[in-house]
């Protein structure tokens, strides 16, 4: 009977320590990724009037936009740079797209996710193997989708993941 009291006491201590550990972990995860949890998503509509390359476009309001978390081959010098630019033109040139702004890069370009209707353009470019996923400073709900689309392109050996480049 004395053994049972010790076991119950040890179990209670273990349970309390486990709950405290869980709460501390949740606190630190939330603290590190609070921008992801608290970020208010707003979208604006723009019209693309020029495609610079597979990840950069200009809008009719004079804004230069860089698609967030992807990096396409540079046009015209990199392997498949021309193909990435042509695909981007086919997707969005002279079309209205929605932007989810993230911030600015070192060159003053607006970093954003681009949507054609409900289609995430960043994800399309990586899934077709015409851009690389580059983890951004701010994790978003789209980060995993873009990373997974790159994995699909790698497995299929599409474009930049083929033996061509």
Image: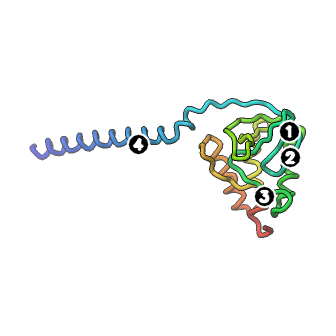
| Gap in angstroms between the C-alphas marked 2 and 3 | 13 Å
* Quarter of the image that includes the C terminus: bottom right
Counting other residues with Cα less than 10 Å from the Cα at mark 4, is it few (<14), some (14-19), or many (20 or more)?
Answer: few
Q: Residue at x 47, y 38 (%)?
A: 31
Toward which corner of the image does residue 75 lie, by quadrant? bottom right
* Quarter of the image that includes the N terminus: top left
Counting other residues with Cα less than 10 Å from the Cα at mark 2, is it few (<14), some (14-19), or many (20 or more)?
Answer: many
Q: Give the number of the disc on residue 51.
A: 2
- Vertical order, 18 against 149 (above or below): above
Toward which corner of the image does residue 98 lie, by quadrant? top right
| Gap in angstroms between the C-alphas marked 3 and 4 | 39 Å
Percent position of residue 48, x then y: 85, 39
Secondary structure of the residue carrying tag 2 is strand
Q: Give the number of the disc on residue 25.
A: 4
| Gap in angstroms between the C-alphas marked 4 and 2 | 44 Å
Q: Residue at x 66, y 53 (%)?
A: 134
| Gap in angstroms between the C-alphas marked 1 and 3 | 20 Å
User: Sequence-wise, which precedes: disc 2 or disc 3?
Assistant: 2
Mark 1 sits on what residue? 48
Q: Give the number of the disc on residue 73.
A: 3
Secondary structure of the residue carrying tag 4 is helix
């Amino acid at each position: 009977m004395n053994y049972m009291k010790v076991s119950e006491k040890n179990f209670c201590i273990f349970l309390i320590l486990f709950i405290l550990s869980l709460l501390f972990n949740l606190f630190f995860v939330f603290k590190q990724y609070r921008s992801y949890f608290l970020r208010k998503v707003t979208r604006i509509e723009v019209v693309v009037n020029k495609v610079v390359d597979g990840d950069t476009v200009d809008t009719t309001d004079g804004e230069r936009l860089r698609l967030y978390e992807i990096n396409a081959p540079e046009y015209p010098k990199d392997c498949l740079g021309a193909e990435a630019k042509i695909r981007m033109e086919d997707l969005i040139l002279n079309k209205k797209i929605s932007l989810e702004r993230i911030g600015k890069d070192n060159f003053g370009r607006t970093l954003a996710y681009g949507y054609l209707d409900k289609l995430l353009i960043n994800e399309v470019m990586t899934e077709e193997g015409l851009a690389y996923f580059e983890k951004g400073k701010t994790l978003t709900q789209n980060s995993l989708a873009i990373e997974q689309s790159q994995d699909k392109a790698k497995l299929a050996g599409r474009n930049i993941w083929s033996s061509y480049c």
